[in-house]
Image (cartoon, helix red, strand yellow):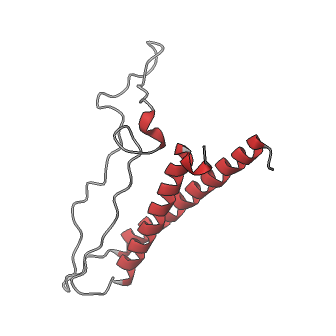
């Protein structure tokens, strides 16, 4: 089996490519912050869950359990994170809807996530090299 076919490395490669493309889109948003009638864009993050493709496609989900009656009960809703409820963008009189603070926060988060993915990818390759004795 080629290294490129390993699901974990393939998912990390897809994630890194997505971060590279998102960086391009965010930079375009920032560069057009003074362009009249410009609306900022963003990319939809690839799903690696049960219904999506990727490394986690065959993995089940873990339910939270109480092992003792003294433990705090899980909240009723289920395990999910709240999404940003901010609908739309604040538009300036020229029609531009780019908020530089939000865009810079997205750029910073994207950079940190990309660094984490590249670190995981390189460490995974290092482990494979160690396992086959090529280190």
Q: Is residue 109 visible?
A: no
Q: Residue at x 48, y 56 (%)?
A: 15
Q: Residue at x 44, y 18 (%)?
A: 66
72 lies above or below 125: above
Give the residue at the far top of this rendering.
69
**Does residue 72 appear left or right of residue 93 in this picture?**
right
Q: Quadrant of residue 89?
A: bottom left
**Does residue 33 appear left or right of residue 55 in this picture?**
left
Q: Residue at x 52, y 44 (%)?
A: 7
Rendered location of residue 105, percent (x, y): 43, 66
Q: Quadrant of the N terminus?
A: top right
Foreground pick, 129 / 27? 129
Q: Is residue 91 visible?
A: yes
83 lies above or below 91: above
Rendered location of residue 10, percent (x, y): 52, 50
Rendered location of residue 72, percent (x, y): 42, 22
76 lies above or below 107: above
64 lies above or below 95: above
Rendered location of residue 18, percent (x, y): 44, 61
Q: Quadrant of residue 128?
A: top right
């Amino acid at each position: 089996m080629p290294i490129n076919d390993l699901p974990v490395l393939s998912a990390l490669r897809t994630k890194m490519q997505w971060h590279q493309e998102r960086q391009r889109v965010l930079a375009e948003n920032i560069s057009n912050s003074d362009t009249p009638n410009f609306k900022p864009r963003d990319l939809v993050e690839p799903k690696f869950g049960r219904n999506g493709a990727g490394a986690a496609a065959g993995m089940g989900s873990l339910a939270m359990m109480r092992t003792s009656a003294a433990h705090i009960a899980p909240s009723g809703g289920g395990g999910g994170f709240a999404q940003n409820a901010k609908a739309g963008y604040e538009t300036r009189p020229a029609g531009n809807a780019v908020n530089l603070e939000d865009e810079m926060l997205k750029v910073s988060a994207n950079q940190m996530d990309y660094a984490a993915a590249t670190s995981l990818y390189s460490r995974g390759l290092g482990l494979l090299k160690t396992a086959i004795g090529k280190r």
